[in-house]
Amino acid sequence: MAHDSHNVVAVGTNDADLYTAIKELERINGGIALAVDGQVTASVSLPVAGLLSTKPLEEVVTELEEINNQVAKLGCKLSAPFATLSFMALPVIPELRLTDLGLVDVKTFKLIPQET
């Protein structure tokens, strides 16, 4: 989820897995989802405004650890990949940011042209 705007942030290697993960977010009423080869492999349900859980803290921590471990097994080297994605969508922090308008150069306030 995008910091401040709370939009969906979806990153992936193929449209089918992105679609599967986004449909899972819809099913669980917001949160974090991972899909690989067309299957949801892990998710963290955050049904309160798509940001908060009603589960005990320990359960949420376990779910976050599981999804982070699965992302690491896919080759991600970031220690907090979902926090990184969240802040990548906060358009007040320089350099490049993801927004609902596209990729923005925050220093120049210009959209970066999309390559086709």
Image (cartoon, rainbow, N blue to C red):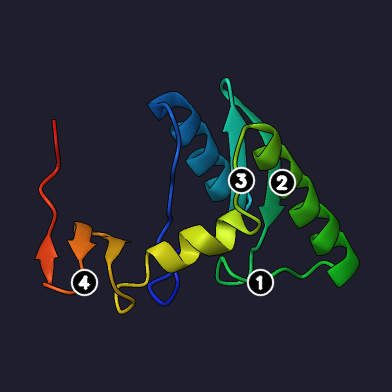
Instruction: Report the Cα–Cα distance between label 1 and label 4.
Output: 29 Å
Residue nearest the viewer, comparing 55 with 93: 93
The numbered mark, 2 or 4, whose residue comes first in the sequence reads 2
Q: What amino acid is at disc 1?
A: Leu
Q: At x 79% / y 46%, what residue is drawn? A: 66
Residue 97 place in picture, x, y as percent: 30, 63
Placement of 66 over or under 105, stated as above or below: above
Question: Counting other residues with Cα less than 10 Å from the Cα at mark 4, is it few (<14), some (14-19), or many (20 or more)?
Answer: some
Which callout, 1 or 2, points at the residue further toward the start of the chain?
1
Which residue sits at x=66%, y=72%? 52
The kind of residue tagged 3 is: Lys
Q: Quadrant of the C terminus?
A: top left
Q: Which residue is mark 2?
A: 67
Q: Which mark is residue 52?
A: 1
Tell me where residue 54 appears, x and y as whole percent. 77, 70
Within 10 Å of the Cα at label 3, are there few (<14), some (14-19), or many (20+) other Cα atoms? few
Which of label 3 and label 2 is nearer to you?
Answer: 3
Distance of label 2 from label 4 (alpha carbons): 30 Å
Image disc number at residue 77? 3
Q: Report how far apart the C-alphas of labels 3 and 2 lie in the structure.
A: 14 Å
Extreme-top residue of the structure: 37
Ranked by sequence position, the earlier of labels 3 and 1 is: 1
